[in-house]
Amino acid sequence: MAKAKIIYSYLLCFFVCSSLSGQDHLSKRNELQKIYLSQVGVREQGGANRGENVEQYLASVGFDPGYAWCAAFVSWCYQQVDVEHPKSAWVPSYATKQNLIYQRGKFMKQLPQTGDVFLIWYERLKRPAHIGFIDQWQDAWVITVEGNTNDDGSREGDGVYRKRRIQRQVWAVSNFIDP
């Protein structure tokens, strides 16, 4: 009987702790979404890769004004909600094997969720060279929020935009919230 109570207590703790952990990850995703959505509409000011917000994103990864900032934007957002991630302005650093959940049309661990990051491959550079947040993963489309882009989806844009991209543009997705 005592052994059954111990097992019951263990199982109860396991299920309660598991559900709380899942809620914590969901809460973290919701907090992150509020942060990155609050930045939609930020635009460069005073020249390419410049402006108060842009310089704040760059400073969060130790860069001065004037550098490409899509990955710095991602890092700054993650820092606001204490998500462990590569604090880097170098897009390929977000393609870590342990965090990849999707690559080139194949789901490796789970479906991409709000707050995961997508990477776009540039054949000319032979590397991923643009990054942003997944806001919604749909059957053929991905709704994103990304920095240093524009209405055309360039990686050398002028602000933070909410975009609709076709899924096949996404080279990889990484999950840093609950890997």
Image: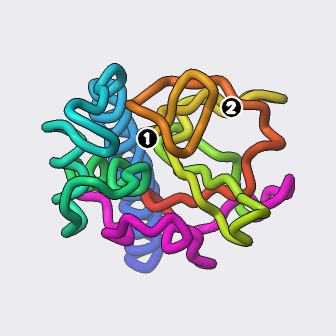
| Residue found at the very far front of the displayed protein | 47
Number of numbered discs: 2
For marks 1 and 2, give the one nearer the viewer. Answer: 1
User: Which residue in the structure is indicated by mark 1?
Assistant: 148
Vertically, is 66 above or below 143?
below
Residue occupying image coordinates x 24% and y 65%: 61
Q: Earlier in the sequence, mark 1 or mark 2?
A: 2
Q: Verify CB contact (< 8 Å) between mark 1 and mark 2.
A: no
User: Which span of residues is magenta-colored?
Assistant: 82-108
Residue occupying image coordinates x 64% and y 67%: 100
User: Which residue in the structure is indicated by mark 2?
Assistant: 142
Residue 29 sits inside the magenta stretch: no
Say what amino acid the circle numbered 1 marks.
Asn
Left/right placement of residue 27 relative to residue 80 reads right
Q: Is residue 16 visible?
A: no
Say what amino acid the circle numbered 2 marks.
Val
Q: Position of residue 63 (x, y in %)?
A: 22, 65
